[in-house]
Image: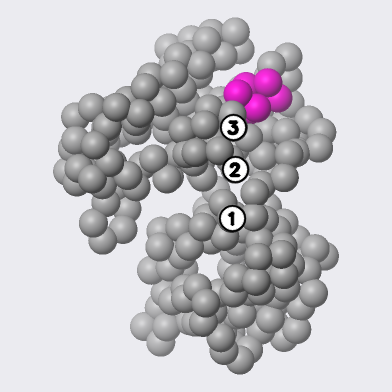
Amino acid sequence: MDSLDTIRDSSERLAAAASGNADVAVTHYPEWTLNDLLIHTGAVYGRTTEIVRTRPRERVRRSFPDDEAPDAVMEWFRSRTAEMIDELAAADLGVPVWGYGPSPTIGFWLSRMVFESTVHAHDAEESVGDPAPIPADLAADGIDEYGMMWGDHISVESDPLQMLAGDTDDRWLLTPRPDGGITFERGATGRGVIVTGSAADLYLWVLARADLSRFVTTGDAPAWHGLFHGVPLARR
């Protein structure tokens, strides 16, 4: 499944889970309902569409629906999804735009929306039943994206963390920096705390959506667990 198909499929799964369940609480966002999750994701999609269309070099603000009744939100969300997919499909992915990382382009936003859509589809499905599994290769790349976006903004007093994905043979070494921040290195090996599990569970863990019972651990894994679960949740 290519990136646009993944976004299309995940957004449809999110909408399907929210349909008829607008007032259900989101498992990992206790103050949100599934209607709120649709609004959040649709606002992110709308901002991405604006970025692709206008190619800004400064931050773009999100916009929200005028009517937050569930039926109106569902229609708005589906419209925002279709518009974004159409814009991304026609875009030159190499064009520089505002974003995250050292040299963001429209291609960054295509990748960002793959992760955004996948994770929030998982959130919605988990809130009403059993979520579809996150593909292992996508989860592994998602850990890399997390490190790029958050590594300079989080810190912990602990030994380095070695995360091992048994299903993909991937590994990440997370090393606290003396001046703050954490260096993420995919493929690197080191000593310290070890957490072993599937790539998908490790991705959900760094996103504060999995607890330590899913993993085999050695060392002070709770310190790292506290770090990931202490990162502020997304704003609606």
Q: Give the CA distance from mark 1 to mark 3.
A: 16 Å
Residue plotted at (60% across, 23% down): 12
Residue beneath disc 2: 119
Q: Is residue 184 visible?
A: yes
Residue 31 drawn at (x, y percent): 64, 36
Where residue 111 sits, quadrant-wise, is top left
Q: Which mark is residue 107?
A: none
Q: CA distance from mark 2 to mark 1?
A: 14 Å
Quadrant in which residue 22 is drawn: top right
Front position in the image: 13 or 58:
13
Q: Amino acid at mark 2?
A: Val
Q: Position of residue 45 (x, y in %)?
A: 42, 29
- Indicate whether 135 appears above or below 123: below
Which of the numbered marks, if any, corresponds to residue 137? 1
Disc nearer the start of the sequence (1/3): 3
Nearest-to-viewer mark from 1 and 3: 1
SS under mark 2: helix
